[in-house]
Amino acid sequence: MLSGLACPLRRDKGRNSVTKMGVFRRLFAPDVAIDLGTANTLVFVKGWGVVLSEPSVVAVDTKTDEVVAVGSAAKSMIGRTPAHIVATQPLKNGVIADFEVTEKMLTYFIRGARPKRSVLRYLVRPRVAVCVPSGVTGVELRAVKEATESAGARKAYTIEEPMAAAIGADLPVSEPEGSMVVDVGGGTTEVAVISLGGFVTKTSVRVAGNDMDMAIVSHIHKHYQIAIGAQTAEQLKIELGSAFPMPEESAAQVRGRDLVTGLPKTVVITSEEIREAIAPAVDTIVEAVRNTLDPTPPELVSDIMDRGMILAGGGALLRHLDERLRNETGVPVHIAEDPLACVARGSGRFLEAIDLDEGSIASD
């Protein structure tokens, strides 16, 4: 439970809990919260807000085992590198798939969050909170903590993504009221009903934005015999994708490699086709919301009907997803303010509820 969010910070009798060492550490190694996502990673620094937002991609030179690029620069290299440079996403479905590459990526992000003009940025290590899917296993959780500490954290904490999203969306998570959040990321969709700082019901499915991208790739491959990359598919999802029929449908040109001739080829794709391609993934998300609502106590359902569910994460930007959920469940749906940064912002606020000296967190 997040008792720290409802209670003042503890202070030992006879001494101020904010010691000189604590002040020193906060000056040169402020606490950092990381929304470590499959598609994107956001870094929140205590007192500064979100300071980094980069794709979760790392380019590594396999000859020297050195990192060539991280983030946007690495993503632009996907499909464009020589054989000895590999651009990869080290996380899959919200969890670590490649420990060493994840550690290198975290090192880059943690260093980027430190004061740039101080030599002490390399000597004093920050405390770091990392967001994880609610369905994470014990082994996966340990891997996240170990990778974070190996990357330069003085101490690593974890917070489940739906809780962070709820806090970032300003939901009253510590009150005896029902709050519902749906966080659609790149690798996972997290749905939870929260009351009194804990989860009443929750569902985590490893279907989200990346699955929609792959569905678009497969659709174009099957129907047009053209090979396209994941980045092209993502752009089509952004431009044409929707979860519900639109008043005015649209279309776009797509360039790819003809699988028969091997030559470049251009075709026109419609928004109806994209909606059809991503429909299985959207259906899975809708079913996860239903499965979370079904066992929720009636009193909390009443609260949710009054307040509505909150839609967060990059998937919240899929056109008419809120309308689809509203139509399927009968519950009002609201898109969080700045849904992409919602989880990072919430995890940063979560850090502020930790005792400055002991760093203790009441666990759920």
Image (cartoon, rainbow, N blue to C red):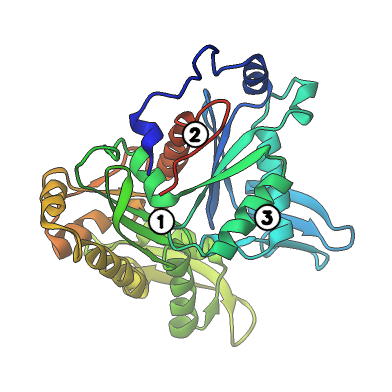
Position in image of residue 118 (x %, y %): 76, 20
Please give the residue where the numbered disc 1 appears in the rendered image: 238
Q: Mark 3 — residue?
A: 102
Residue 108 image-quadrant placement:
top right
Q: Which one is earlier in the sequence, the residue at label 2 or at label 1? A: 1
Image quadrant in which you'd find residue 322:
bottom left
Left/right placement of residue 138 relative to residue 311 reads: right
Q: Outermost residue, front direction?
A: 14
Q: Answer whether residue 246 is visible to the viewer in this image.
A: no
In the image, which disc is placed on residue 351?
Answer: 2
Going by the numbered disc 3, the residue's amino acid type is Thr
- Residue 323 image position (x, y, % from top left): 19, 56
Counting residues from the start of the chain, the first of labels 3 and 1 encountered is 3
- x%, y% of residue 80? 71, 62
**Along the line of sight, which residue is nearer the eye, 301 or 116?**
301
Q: Is residue 135 above or below residue 346?
A: below
- The structure residue drawn at horizontal position 66% and vertical position 27%, both measured from the top left corner, is 29
**Picture quarter with the N terminus:** top left
**Kind of residue indicated by mark 2:** Leu
Q: Earlier in the sequence, mark 3 or mark 2?
A: 3
Callout 1: SS: helix
Q: Which mark is residue 20?
A: none
Residue 285 % position (x, y): 32, 66
**Which residue appears at 73% of the width and 48% of the height?**
150
How far apart marks 3 and 2 lie (CA) works out to 22 Å
The amino acid beneath tag 1 is Ile
Residue 27 or residue 235, whichever sits in front: 27
Residue neighbourhood size for the residue with mark 3, other residues' Cα within 10 Å, grouped as few (<14), some (14–19), many (≥20): many
